Image: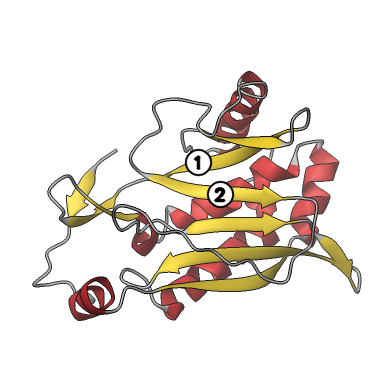
Amino acid sequence: MTFERIDMEQWPRREHYRYYNEQIRTSYEMNVELDVTKLRKRCRKKGIHFYPAMMYAIMYSINHHENFRMALDEEGHLGVYDVCHPSYTIFHEDDETFSDIWTEWNEDFSIFYKDVCRDMKQYKDSKGIKAKPDRPDAFTPVSCVPWVSFISVGHDTPGPRQMYFPIIVFGRYHEVHDRWMLPFSIMVNHAVADGYHTAMLINDIQEQCSHCKKWLKK
């Protein structure tokens, strides 16, 4: 995993970054429904879990759009990681709490799926917000809320320093006119990505869901 600083004098978004970072700190959300008909069917045919498969589609797209892999280094310089890893939630049914765990990203779906299933099994009884230690600095928060098909999700996430990684939540898929639709929400820091960039990311995630036969061969 490498981190490359952005040359602010050459970066086309430098004025937008400074405006939304120094004058009006703004985050925004997009809430859409993704068509997961083919992905759901493929998962059922192959006998695999939907959650890791959907996470693969998300992380594949994140790792092909650099605006969503940006962060500050220790000296406060903005840069881009070459890869981000999913930091995702697992639910504990016995006490109705959740924990964050993470899994190393791998573009080979069979490897990624195996690693996610291994981590979910290993930490399923580990309680606390951060169950798996040593999370890398480059991560994408992903949560699943499988109990409801929401219309939108709101976030209010202040912190000690700016976070530029997006926050992603998806809910329970539901049937609409013979299609299976998945509620999907993404919160984005406006300093690093505009509506165009987020729309391109969402379109790419939809593309991965619609053409899952290319990677879901397990």
**The C terminus lies in quadrant:** top right
Callout 2: helix, strand or loop?
strand
Residue at screen point 61% across, 49% down? 143
List the residue tagged with mark 1.
Answer: 87
Examine the image and state in which quarter residue 100 appears: top right
Give the percent coordinates (x, y) of residue 164: 35, 59
| Mark pair 1, 2: CA separation | 6 Å
Q: Is residue 174 left or right of residue 22?
A: right
Judge the density around disc 1: few (<14), some (14-19), many (≥20) Cα neighbours within 10 Å. many
Give the percent coordinates (x, y) of residue 121: 67, 22
- Does any portion of residue 12 appear in the rendered image? no
Q: Is residue 5 left or right of residue 52?
A: left
List the residue tagged with mark 2.
Answer: 142
- Does any portion of residue 108 appear in the rendered image? yes
Judge the density around disc 2: few (<14), some (14-19), many (≥20) Cα neighbours within 10 Å. many
**The N terminus lies in quadrant:** top left
What amino acid type should be assigned to the residue bearing mark 1?
Ser
